[in-house]
């Protein structure tokens, strides 16, 4: 009997408490900011072009602005890429691309701060015999928008923020 009374009191309290309207019971919603997708894609294209130009101009010191501090890269393991790595190590580990040509096949804006870029690329370097060599690969770049204030201005840009780069190789 005491169990039935106790259960009835609990049930009554639940019904009563659920029927009370709280001051904070409504969920506040904010409209999502509208993205200008074309402007975002143009920004990614500008960044990709600047990245390729920095390599072509051998401005290797500028390349740090195109990746995160915790960059994770996976290099292809084909015979051609292993030969490139061997020659690079003989040059004291110096970065030695002559140029890179990226051919994006799919660029997707996931949110206002994340996108990905998938495609193929050709990397060119000069081997020990002085010959120009083309290396082919497939890339997947995870892009994270850099939002900061510099010189009193709010700046948004799409550095490549390469979290993952070479995922496959074809020759």
Image (tube, grey):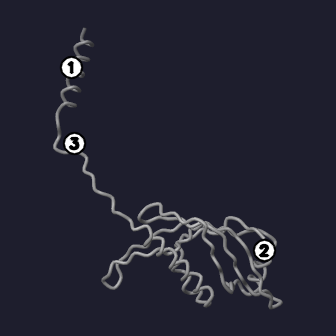
Task: For marks 1 and 2, give the one nearer the viewer.
Answer: 2
The residue where tag 1 is placed is 9
Is 96 or 138 nearer to us in this picture?
A: 138
C-alpha span from label 2 to label 3: 62 Å
- Sort mark 2 into few (<14), some (14-19) or many (20+) by Cα contacts within 10 Å: few
Sooner in the amino-acid sequence: mark 3 or mark 1: 1
| CA–CA distance in space, label 1 to label 2 | 76 Å
Q: Residues within 10 Å of mark 3 (few under 14, many from 20)?
A: few
Q: Where is residue 134 in the image (x, y as percent from the top left)?
A: 75, 80
Q: Do the residues labelled 3 and 1 touch (CB within 8 Å)?
A: no
Count of marks, rendered view: 3
Q: In this view, does 43 lie above or below 27?
A: below
Q: Position of residue 121 (x, y in %)?
A: 67, 74
User: Which residue matches tag 3?
Assistant: 25
Q: In this view, does 68 lie to the left or right of 127?
A: left
Task: Nearest to the eye among marks 3 and 1: give it.
Answer: 3
Note whether 21 is above or below 165 in the view shown: above
User: Which residue, as the protein is rendered here, is positioned at the far right?
Assistant: 129
Which of the two discs, 1 and 2, labels the residue nearer the N terminus? 1
């Amino acid at each position: 009997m005491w169990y039935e009374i106790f259960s009835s009191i609990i049930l009554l309290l639940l019904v009563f408490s659920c029927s009370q309207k709280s001051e904070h019971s409504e969920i506040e919603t904010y409209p999502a900011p509208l993205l200008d997708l074309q402007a975002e894609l143009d920004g990614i294209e500008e960044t990709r072009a600047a990245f390729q130009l920095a390599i072509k101009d051998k401005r290797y010191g500028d390349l740090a602005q195109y990746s995160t501090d915790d960059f994770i890269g996976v290099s292809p393991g084909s015979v051609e890429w292993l030969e490139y790595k061997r020659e690079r190590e003989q040059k004291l580990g110096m970065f030695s691309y002559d140029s890179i040509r990226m051919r994006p096949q799919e660029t997707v804006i996931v949110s206002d701060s994340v996108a990905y870029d998938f495609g193929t690329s050709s990397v060119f370097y000069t081997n020990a015999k002085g010959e120009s060599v083309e290396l082919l690969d497939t890339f997947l770049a995870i892009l994270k928008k850099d939002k900061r204030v510099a010189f009193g201005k709010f700046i948004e840009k799409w550095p490549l923020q390469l979290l993952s780069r070479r995922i496959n190789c074809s020759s």
